[in-house]
Image (tube, rainbow, N blue to C red):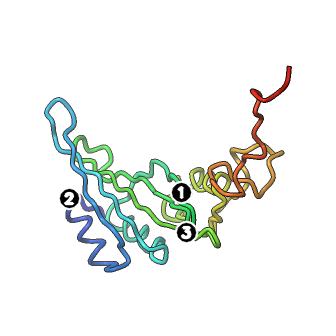
Amino acid sequence: MSKNLSADEIVKYFKDEFKSKIKKDEIRKRKAGSKKNEKYSIWLKIDKDIFKDFIKKLCEIQFPHLAVASGNDLGKTIELIYHFTLNSGKRMSEIELNVSVELPKSKPEIETICDYVPGALITEREKQEMLGVKIIGIPDSRKLFLPDDIPDNVYPWRRDETGPEKYYKNLHEVKK
């Protein structure tokens, strides 16, 4: 089933479907192009428990284009933001959908979405290497970005003791 829903209809659909598991929603509008057409960006923060079901429902509405998943170390949690486009290829009717989920650092795990969005493989592998997120069920979990001499418990995008600080080469401190 492929539906072209408005930004308001998309938010309503997910809020009706998942109720309080949608923790926060925001629709941002901006003008774009020479004709100043309105463009919409949806930001949804969802509960980790519904993540996989959310992606399944999203794919039932319309197969989304996944640009990338970004990630942030927020201190006690790791935030993943999956950046999708709906109505992809339909000029001036595309809607950005950004789905945010927080994972506790004590157990940073989330299920893969590769079974629904096969193109998620590379971005999920990146989150494993750079943030230390365990992607459950990922079809290929080999390292892709980091050199082999970086230990498995060092994550370059983390701001805690697992970060890469002790591996930096501070050339400005080298004596001549």
Give the number of the mark in front: 2 or 1. 2
**In the structure shown, which secondary structural element does the residue marked by tag 2 occupy?**
loop
Above or below 47: residue 9 = above
**Badge 3, how many Cα within 10 Å: few under 14, some, many 20+?**
some
Q: Where residue 38 appears, x then y in whole percent?
A: 17, 44
Q: Residue beneath label 2, please?
A: 6
How far apart marks 2 and 1 lie (CA) works out to: 25 Å
Q: Is residue 122 left or right of residue 168?
A: left
- Hey, what amino acid is under mark 3? Leu
Give the number of the mark in front: 3 or 2. 3
Q: Is residue 161 left or right of residue 119?
A: right
Q: Where residue 50 appears, x then y in whole percent?
A: 45, 76
Above or below 171: residue 25 = below
Between 97 and 79, the residue placed more toward the observer is 79
| Disc with the residue nearer the chain's start (3 vs 1) | 3
Q: Residue beneath label 1, please?
A: 118
At horizontal 30% and vertical 71% (from top left) the residue drawn is 14
Question: Residues at badges 3 and 2 in contact (C-beta under 8 Å)?
Answer: no
Q: Which numbered circle lies on residue 103?
A: 3
**Badge 1, how many Cα within 10 Å: few under 14, some, many 20+?**
few
**Badge 2, how many Cα within 10 Å: few under 14, some, many 20+?**
some
Question: Residues at badges 2 and 1 in contact (C-beta under 8 Å)?
Answer: no
How far apart marks 3 and 1 lie (CA) works out to: 22 Å
Quadrant that contains the N terminus: bottom left
- Hey, what amino acid is under mark 2? Ser
- Hey, what amino acid is under mark 1? Pro
Between 142 and 88, the residue placed more toward the observer is 142
